[in-house]
Image: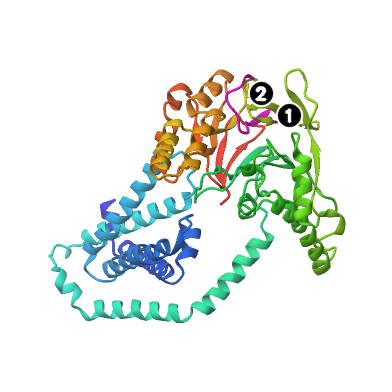
Amino acid sequence: MSTLLATPRVEVALRVLGAGVGILFLLMGLGFLVMPEVLATTLLAAEPARAVGINSLRGDFGGLFLGLSLFTLVGTSTRHHWLLLVPIVFLALIVMGRLISLVVDDLPLVAKGALASELAFLAILALSMRSTSLRPDAGGRTHVGSVVFRKRFALAIGIVVALVTLAFQGQRQIGMRLLGGLASSFVTTNGLERLPDGLHVGLAGTGAPLPDQRRRGPCSFVLAGKHLFIVDSGPGSTLSLESMRVPLGDIQAVLLTHVHSDHIGGLGELMLKAWTRGARPEPLKVVGPEGVEAVVAGFNLAYFIDAGFRVAHHGPIVAPAGGAGGVAETLTSFGPDGTAVVFETENLKVTAFLVDHRPVEPALGYRFDYKGRSVVISGDTLPSESLRRQAQSADVLLHEALQPEMLRVVHDAALAAGRVSAAKVTADILTYHTFPEEVARIARDANVGHVVLHHLIPPVPVRVLHSAFLGDARNIFSGPITMGIEGMVLSLRPDRSSVDVGWLL
């Protein structure tokens, strides 16, 4: 191996590849300087928060990649190959961080391509450095000053400065070209088209009424074959569905678990966009417990004037006159076991069942069975025998969760701040939600395959709080427990027994 690396042709090839890596780092550094938000979402799968996040992206990531580029290009284009050690060390640390995340985080590995690229870059630079060091004349030492104060180094710095200046001067042209590609993708992409036949549940809202910048109100979509359902429509969740490229015009029905405001706050917007995004000729069906008629009628009335404007402006191609709003279907008849079949075909059965969210009555959960795979969505509830029966042998249990110890911290903080009403709410909600350990017991007793927690109370803004939120749940239930977050999709294929966790954001 060493003999092969020492040959001139291999050395030149590795230098060229290394220079290519350096140029790529240069382009990424320029990108983070000029358009940090775009690279954050496309390369890092991250959303910058406010101006502070954008400033950090420009400074930290722009500086990082420009620095990596500088050391890589100088190391591959001069005899100072030892400079490659700098990007090699940084790449090794980046790879280590990604692998640690893969092991300890309960999130899908969304950066597989980035990890593969970083490993490839690391291998190229390491081999290039090793190849150069094997040359017979590679033994001399070099002082850093002799590199920094050379004309070639100054020329490289000048080129980088010129490129940065040109990039900022051309922001308008770059932005318009970029917009063309983004607009085409946004208009034409259906994020569910690439999902295989099976039962898929996607999380569009995993939050609760307490403010949480990372999460929207409760909302999930369930795709069973070609049948698309939305379960609950919390505030802001329609935007999440659109960001996940869920085709709103294809929604078969919205299934409400109950009519608390945090579960219906986005329904008006969802009905409007389901109508205009798919030119629906009939109103959207909204299924739920008693009270759903008043909710749908209220949103229909609130959006009545707006709907008239849409018809007048866009016409039937976008807004067919008979398709605006929603039509309610109230579930009033339940069997002795507290269940009612909502929808049924040869391969799909959707069952509503009563849960315990008193004083909110009735409140529902839903079970979806498709070609031998099953998903249960709890709705808001205390532990109940009805839910335990319906969760029996389910592949996935999507369950709400409240962490009492963490909520007491919030309660005490509200009291200390003199916010009496907030303190009262944080005390009251302890009485009609399920604790993580209780969810774990339900899953264990019902032989559930995979637990996903959502409707998280209190907010869990950072990953380091996940362990505290779960408490002893993982000691009770031996299967996987996932903390839900917007964009997550769990896929259950009929020909497999696994639950595949993916990403649509």
User: Where in the figure is residue 464, as x and y percent of width and height?
Assistant: 38, 41
Label 2, secondary structure: give it: helix
**Label 1 neighbour load within 10 Å: few <14, some 14-19, many 20+:** some
In the image, is residue 446 above or below residue 7?
Answer: above
Q: Bounds of the magenta span? A: 366-385
- Residue 174, percent across and down? 52, 75
Identify the amino acid type marked 1. Answer: Thr
Q: Quadrant of residue 432?
A: top right
The span from disc 2 to disc 1 (Cα, nearest Å) is 9 Å
Element type at mark 1 = strand
Question: Vertically, is 198 above or below 60?
Answer: above
Check if residue 123 falls in the magenta segment: no
Tag 2: residue type?
A: Gln
Q: Residue at x 42, y 26 (%)?
A: 472
- Looking at the image, is 158 positioned above or below residue 317? below
Residue at image mark 2: 390
Residue 373 percent across, percent down from the top left: 66, 29
**Residue located farthest toward the right when viewing the structure as drawn:** 322
Figure quadrant of residue 368: top right
Is 301 placed left or right of 236 in the picture? Answer: right
